[in-house]
Every structure is written in C-alpha cells, then in structure tokens.
C-alpha cells in the first residue's frame, strides 16, 4: 500500500519540477532579448540574453524581442504633389529594434505603428515637392523619409535603416506629357550633337586649309629664295667673266647677235642703241685686221727679196 503512494508522490514531484523548469528556464538566441516583467515591473537591468536565463515562476513574465533587421511593405498610396498632380507611390521600410525595453513598453505593435506613420509622413513629404522633382529626385526623397521616420520611431526603441521607393505611377496624361518632353529632349540633343559635329568638322577643314596654305606659302617663299640666290650667283659669275672681256670680244658678240636676228623668221627688227659705237668698233677691228694683213705681206715680200739676193750672190761666186 505504501509503495503505490510513494510512487505517486514521486511522479507528482517530478511533474512539478518539470513544470517549474519549463516556466523558469529560457534559452535566448544571439539575435534575441528577453524583457522580464517582475510583478508587472521592468527596467533596463531586466533585459536578459543571450544564453540561458532563469526566471522565477509565476512572479516573472518574459517578452521576447527580435533584434534582426526586418522590413515592411507599404502598399501603393495616392499622394498629391506640390503642383496638385496625383501620383501613386509604394515603398519598402527596413528597420530593427535597438532598445528592447522601449519597443515592448512604449508601443504595442511596432511594425503596425511604423506602417501607419509612414503613410502620413509620405503624404507630407510629397506634398512639398513638385512632380518633376518627385520623378527625378528619388534618392533624396528616400533620405528625407528615412530621417523623418527615424525621428518618430526613436521613442519606440526602433531605428529605420533604409527607405526605398519601389514604384511611382503618374496619371496617364502626365505620362503622355512626359513622353513628349522626353522625345523633344532627345531631338534637341540630337540636333545639338549634329551641329557640334558639323562645327567641329568645319573647324578641322579650316585648320587643314590653313596649314596647307601656310605650307604652300612657305614652299613658295623657299623656292623664290632659291631662285633669287641662283639668279644672283649667275649674275655674279657673269660679272666676273665679263670683267675680263675686251672690246673686240664684245664687238664679235654683237655681230653674232645681229647675225642670229637676221637669220630668224621674225618680222620684227631690233636695232641696238649702241649701233654707232658698234660700227666704230667694227671699223677699228677691220682696220686692225687689214693692217695686220698688210704687214704680213710686206714681211713676206722682204723675206722673198732676201732669199733671191742670197741666191744671186751664190751664183756669182760659183
């Protein structure tokens, strides 16, 4: 009789110990923290983990928080820009818990509260920006949203790390106007590019012609210099040779020139201004020639006379 009672008591004690162990022992992961409420009160010192945490059953109540970075998706919201253009925007918010106690004590549902405040903050931010800026300054809008949301969530023990606008949908008429503007901008850039190419081509052609003219002028100048130097050298040599020419040679040269003019088929007659001087020189030259011939004949007659006299003397002696 005693044995069954003892066995039941042992089983009861074991069950109580297991229940107490289950209620008092917690294993906290590295990315988790336990906010312990003792008789409904807590403090920063009662934030436990990671590792093995022992609680007082019935007296302590633990709330587990996750410190990993998480995200929420804010569905598409219709917003009015500063120039009264309606656009639909949806975006993502990345956040994490930095103060586990305040995330449990100050807010009941951190993710839900963050999603709700993000929609109103988005409307306030977009309402101060023009449509063109909303479409072209997405990175700046992301940073403004992140800063404003981070200021709001700081009292809840959380931190907004990143805000990413995923899609911006403008009305149909606005999209058509944007497409026309984009087409006009592309045409303008094409015209500017074409004109710049034509201008650069004209500049290159002008530069080429300029260089060509410079080189051609330089070549003509060098050629003229060489011709002038050659002509000067020829004149110097002619002058050097002419210094040793006597009047007879010049007279013969005039005579040869006149003879060539006379033999040519030209119908023009060239009479030199020095004709009188030429005739005088020619006469002097002929006189000198006649005198030389007469002297030669006289010398020959004298020689023949001497020869005949010698022959007669020889014959008399014999």
Image: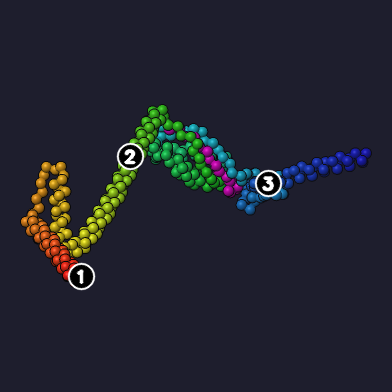
Q: Is residue 136 left or right of residue 28?
A: left
> Which residue position is annotated with label 1?
318
* In front: label 1 or label 3: 1
Q: Crowdedness of circle 1 by 10 Å Cα count: few (<14), some, many (20+)?
A: few
* In front: label 2 or label 3: 2
Q: Residue at the spot x=10%, y=49% of the render?
A: 270
On whether residue 144 falls in the magenta region, the answer is no
> Quick one: label 1 or label 2, which is nearer the N terminus?
2
* In front: label 1 or label 2: 1
How far from the left and from the top, in percent, is residue 86? 41, 32
Q: Residue at the spot x=44%, y=43% of the render?
A: 140
Q: Residue most toward the front?
A: 318
Q: Residue at the spot x=25%, y=54% of the render?
A: 227
User: What's the distance in space between the residues labelled 1 and 2, CA to CA?
Assistant: 124 Å
How far from the left and from the top, in percent, is residue 314? 19, 69
Q: Crowdedness of circle 2 by 10 Å Cα count: few (<14), some, many (20+)?
A: few
Looking at the image, which is closer to me, 263 or 266?
Answer: 263
Q: Determine whether 310 is above or below 108 in the image.
A: below
**Which region of the structure is painted magenta?**
87-105
Q: How many marks?
A: 3
> Which residue position is annotated with label 2?
198
User: What's the distance in space between the residues labelled 1 and 3, CA to CA?
Assistant: 177 Å
> Quick one: label 2 or label 3, which is nearer the N terminus?
3
Label 2: element kind: helix
Residue 29's label in the rendered image is 3
């Amino acid at each position: 009789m005693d044995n069954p009672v003892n066995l039941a008591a042992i089983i009861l004690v074991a069950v109580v110990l297991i229940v107490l162990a289950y209620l008092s022992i917690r294993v906290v992961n590295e990315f988790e923290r336990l906010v312990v409420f003792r008789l409904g009160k807590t403090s920063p010192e009662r934030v436990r983990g990671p590792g093995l945490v022992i609680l007082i059953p019935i007296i302590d109540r633990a709330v587990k928080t996750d410190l990993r970075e998480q995200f929420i998706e804010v569905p598409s919201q219709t917003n009015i820009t500063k120039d009264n253009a309606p656009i639909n925007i949806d975006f993502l918010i990345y956040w994490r818990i930095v103060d586990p106690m305040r995330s449990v004590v100050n807010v009941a549902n951190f993710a839900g509260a963050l999603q709700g405040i993000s929609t109103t903050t988005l409307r306030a931010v977009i309402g101060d920006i023009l449509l063109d800026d909303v479409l072209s300054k997405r990175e700046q809008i992301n940073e403004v949203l992140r800063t404003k949301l981070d200021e709001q969530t700081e009292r809840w023990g959380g931190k907004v790390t990143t805000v990413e606008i995923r899609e911006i949908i403008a009305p149909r008429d606005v999209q058509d106007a944007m497409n026309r503007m984009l087409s006009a901008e592309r045409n303008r850039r094409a015209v500017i590019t074409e004109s710049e190419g034509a201008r650069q081509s004209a500049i290159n052609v002008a530069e080429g012609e300029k260089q060509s003219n410079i080189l051609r002028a330089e070549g003509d100048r060098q050629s003229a210099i060489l011709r002038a130097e050659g002509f000067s050298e020829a004149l110097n040599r002619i002058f050097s040779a002419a210094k040793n020419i006597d009047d007879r040679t010049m007279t013969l040269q005039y005579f040869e020139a006149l003879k060539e003019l006379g033999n040519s088929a030209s119908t023009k007659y060239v009479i030199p201004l020095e004709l009188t001087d030429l005739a005088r020189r020619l006469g002097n030259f002929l006189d000198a020639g006649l005198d030389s011939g007469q002297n030669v004949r006289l010398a020959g007659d004298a020689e023949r006379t001497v020869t005949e006299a010698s022959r007669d003397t020889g014959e008399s002696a014999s």
